Amino acid sequence: MADIATLEGRITAALDRARRGVEKLGAASAGPGGGPEDAAALNARLDEERTVNAQLEERVRALKQRQDSAVAKLEAQAEVRAAQFAEFESEIARLAQANADLRAVAVEMREALAAEVAEPELVNRAMQAELDALRAVRESDRQEVAAVIAELKPLIEEAG
């Protein structure tokens, strides 16, 4: 019997707590800030948050597009630089070959002059080798100036 009275008291206390909770919820929805006005305010805030989220997504998209554009531009510049570098390497190789030819002909001429035999063909070859070396140097200088101008042109246009 005592157990039944104890259980009955516990059930009554639980029901009282549930009743008070329901009353608090009813008062909260009926009081200030409750009811349909509160739902409308929450919906308005939700719409604001959605708008802000959409704006942020658009900004992220714009930043990504700008970044992709910058990366593409840098990649294009890297390709141009790689082509210029390859061109410079071939020009340097040509210049080195012209200088090697010039040295070889100069050695032959010295040997011929030491033997006091000055062959016209040897003199012509020496002059031709020297002209080739000078042309190679001039071409190398021209390419270097063209590369500097190519670097300066975007900076000048940007400043203007």
Image (cartoon, rainbow, N blue to C red):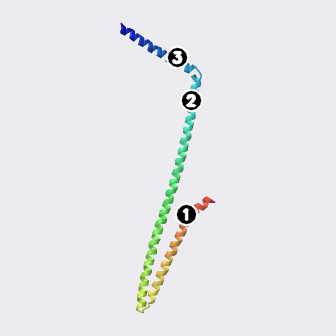
What SS does tag 3 mark? helix
Amino acid of disc 2:
Asn
The residue under the point 42% across, 11% down is 9
The residue under the point 55% across, 35% down is 50
What is the distance, in whole Å, between disc 2 and disc 3 at their CAs? 25 Å
The residue under the point 60% across, 62% down is 156
Q: Quadrant of residue 44?
A: top right
- Give whichever of discs 1 and 2 has the lower sequence position: 2
Most extreme residue toward the top is 1
What SS does tag 2 mark? helix
What is the distance, in whole Å, between disc 1 and disc 3 at their CAs? 78 Å
Q: Position of residue 31 (x, y in %)?
A: 58, 20
CB-based contact (under 8 Å), mark 1 and mark 3 = no
Q: Which residue is mark 1?
A: 151
Q: Quadrant of residue 2?
A: top left
Q: Which residue is mark 2?
A: 43
Amino acid of disc 1:
Glu
Q: Which class describes the residues within 10 Å of circle 3: few (<14), some (14-19), or many (20+)?
A: few
Amino acid of disc 3:
Glu
